[in-house]
Each structure stands twice: as C-alpha cells, then as structure tokens.
Amino acid sequence: MKRQTLLITVVALALSACSSIGAKPWQRSALARPDMQVDADPVLAGLDDHIYFSKEASSGGRGFGGGGCGCN
Amino acid sequence: MQLKNRRQSLTAATLTLLGTAAAGGAQADGRSWDIDSAVLVYSESGGRVQAIEPVVKGTLDLGGERYFSAKLVFDSLTGASPNGATPASTPQTFTGASGGGRASVTPAFETPLDDRFKDTRVQGVLDYSFPVSANGTLGFGGTVSSEYDFLSAGANLRYAHDLFQNNTTLSVGLSVEADQIDPVGGAPEPLTRVATGGGGGGDDEGEGEGENEGGGGRTQSKTVTDLVLGLTQVLGPRSLLQLNYSLSASSGYQNDPYKLLSVVGSDGEPDYYVWESRPDSRLKHALFARYKLFSFNRDVVDASYRYMTDDWGIASSTIDLTYRWNFAAHHYLEPHLRWYTQTAADFYRVALYDGEDQTVAHASADPRLGAFDAWTAGVKLGGTLNSGSDWSARLEWYQQQSKLTGVPAQAADGLSKFDLQPDLSAVMFTVGYRFKW
C-alpha cells in the first residue's frame, strides 16, 4: 500500500512536470522550421549511416540499424 | 443553382477519392513531387576504398497528411580493403577471394590488402505513411538491395502517437530484413586453412589437411529484426529532446567470407592462414538521445549521443554535434564534429598463435571489430535559391585511430616489428539538391 502511494505520487509529480514543459500552439514558429526537425536532412543522414555502418561495428540508434548491404 | 451545387459536391467527392481533400490543405491544381537528391564521394587514403553514391528520393504529398515516397540509391566501390592477415618480413601471396582466384603479392612489412575489391550496389525503398486517428500515424515501407554477392529484402512498420497538444510523440517501429550472401567461390568453412599461391611469408604447406580454397560453400543467409521505441518531447518553444531505444537481433551467417587470419609462430611470421569465424547470432542494444535548440533566434544546435552494446563484447559511444549558423536569410554554414569509440569484440584477434586455430571457437581479424577511436570533422554550406530549391555542399574528414588488442602473447615480441593496425583516413564530399517537380 505504501509502495502504491509512493508510485502514485511519483507519477503525479512526473505528469505535473510535463505540464510545465512543452510549447503552446502559438509558440511553435521555431519548432516548425525545417531545420528544427529531428531528421532535417534524411538523405544525407542515410548516406552517413551507410558509411559508418560499413566502417564501424555499430549501427542504428537514430532509426533501424539494418544496413541492407553486404559491407559489414 | 442546384446544378452548380451538385457539380461542386461532385468535384469535392472526386477530390476526396483522389486524396486531395481540402482538409489536408492540398492543392486542387495538381500535386508535385518533392525531390531530394545527393551524391557522396568517399575516398580513403593509401589507395584503399573509393566510393561514389548517388541518391534520389521523391516524396508525394497525397493530402490529408498522407505521404508516399520512393528512394533509389546507387553505390559504386573500388579499391583495396585489408584481408585480415598481418604483415610479414617477406612478401606474401594471396589468391583473393573476390578477385576470382588471381594471385596478388603483398610486399614485406605491408598490410595485406584484397586489392581487387569492386562492388556495385543498387537499393530501392518504398514508403507510405498516413494518419489512423487524430493523433496517430502509421507508416510502412519495403526495401530491396542488390550486390553481385549479396541480396537483401526488408519490410518495416511504424506507429507514432502524439500526446499533450503535440508536445510528446511516442513511437514504435519494427523492421525485418532477410539477407542472402553468395560469396565468390562459395562461403569458406570457418577456421580452415586458406589456399595460398605460395610465397615467402607463408609456410605453404600446400597439402595441409582441411585446406579450403573457398569453394564449395552453399549460399548463406541471415535475418535481422529491429525494434525501435522512441519518445520525442518538446521542452519549450525553442528546444526538443528525442530519446530512442533500439534492439537489433541478427541470426544466421555473420562472417565476412573474404576475411582471414594469419597463424603465426613466436617469430611473428605467418605459418599459414585460416578463414575467420564469427558467432551465428548477434544481439545489439542502443540508446540514442538528441537535443535540438533554436539559438540566438537564428541558429540551430543539434547534439546527439548514442551508446551501443552487443553480445559480442563490443560497446561503443558516439557524440555528434552540428551548429547551423544561418548567417544570411537564405544561406547557412554548418560545422560538424563527431567522435566515436568502440571496444573490441571478444573474439577479435590480430593473429592466432601456431595451432590456436584448432582450439578457438571464433576468431576475426577484421579491423572493424577491433578497438578504435574515430573523429569526423567537416563543414556544410547551403542555401535556398529564388526558385525555392535548396542546395548544400559538405566536406568532411574521417580518421580512425586503432588501439592494439588481440595480440597473441606468445608471438607479441615477434609481431611488434610490424604495424599491425594501420590507421584509416578518408575524405567525404557530398552535394545535395532539393526541388519541387
């Protein structure tokens, strides 16, 4: 029971923290810019992923890690 | 009047069928493709790998937040790549697997390269995404990639859900890829002896048991399944945070069929060579975090970090930083720095000591499985033309600095006279052009 109360308190605190972050619809001009998108240049990012996939032992993270190539 | 109304409603119905409903804000006067194209030129120093990779991607806005895209990638590679063998005090001769059996001689004290490395790859990707509810978007895609010794087909499904007035986006993606590998001359049996064309460095025990010329192996296959869970959170009017966890499970043939290892004596000189052997599965976990900030009411900071670990014993960290300086209304300059570090796979070995090939289960001298740090530094210049088209040009330098691990203790003195893991450096130049068509 104690643990449940603690959990509810933590979740409520987390949600209240969420309500203070973010942007209102009328505050989104910067966030709507093409250069502020999480994947602003997907074609270039794809080329980078392919180079690093074929030269290093890591892949993925940003998206799917499969390379679709026999280079590694 | 009634006729006019009827015609209007018919027009509206037709547009709806065509997917150009006014709700999506789409133009009734014909759709256009957004074409995103780029060409990458990649050049390693020392006559190693050279590559040219053109890409073209077209995205069609079907209205109502529905998008169809098609992407085509060509990839042409030439040059030399290390075959895994260590240098020797005398010339070494290899009949490179990818060269169709012709012999090449590596001069004394030089890193043996498979110098007839040549490949062309073609990849096609199709994708479609559409809303399934007021806050949910579904996407699916397929990809096919073909090389002379490799064929890959994959499919993926993604779902993204917006919450809290679009301040939070949760996403999940699943991808499955099936690969078929047809090595030139067949897939060699792991840890069996490589047939060499004779030569000073090798002991050249031609009739050695278990010798394998790389012939006879069947077509090999592997499947890769990826799961990605994502959270994107708007932190404020000028910043956002993206967090991803990804799991990648690969099972099947993981070897590089052209990579071998030297088996050396205590003098560090090769007695013979064996084909590499990797486990037949690999499980990778990755955590990725990206922070974006619109700064000085003009520029964009993009900082990301990735931690990856797998069950081969490899752990890596990647830090990536770009600063987009929008110095004029339609032009920008974007410096880029990337730092990468990885530990070696448990079975990574520079070489094996005499007879060790009979006792180990797995071994690979592929430098990509060794420990190293890597730096990328570059700059991108871009702009928007009066027509609305975007262009960019990027020049980057890539440098790997290896950390020597996996040296057999009994041969460490003998091998110390060689440069066992030469550093890799490359120059990359990319031009990009986006336009409406």
Image: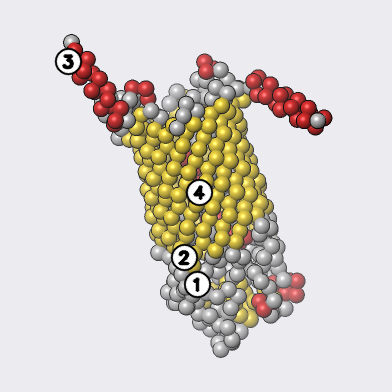
* Image side of residue B343 versus residue B163, left or right: right
Q: Which residue is tagged 2?
A: B181
Q: Residues within 10 Å of mark 2 (few under 14, many from 20)?
A: many
Residue at (63% x, 63% y) in the render: B421
Of label 2 and label 1, which has the lower sequence position? 2
| Marks 3/1: CA–CA distance | 73 Å
Asked if the residues shown at circle 4 and circle 2 are in contact, with their CB atoms under 8 angstroms apart, the answer is no
Please state which of the two labelled residues, at mark 2 or mark 3, is closer to the viewer. Answer: 3
Q: Secondary structure at mark 1?
A: loop
Q: In the image as oriented, which residue stretches furthest toward the front? A: A1
Q: Which residue is tagged 1?
A: B187
Of label 4 and label 2, which has the lower sequence position? 4
| Marks 2/1: CA–CA distance | 8 Å
Up-down relation of residue B343 to residue B33 (above or below): below
Q: Are marks 4 and 3 on the same chain?
A: yes
Specify the subunit that label 3 lies on. Answer: B
Q: Which residue is tagged 4?
A: B175
| Marks 4/2: CA–CA distance | 20 Å
Residue B317 location (% of width, % of height): 66, 47
Specify the subunit that label 2 lies on. Answer: B
Of label 3 and label 1, which has the lower sequence position? 3
Residue B124 location (% of width, % of height): 38, 50
The circle drawn on residue B77 is none
Please state which of the two labelled residues, at mark 4 or mark 2, is closer to the viewer. Answer: 4
Specify the subunit that label 1 lies on. Answer: B
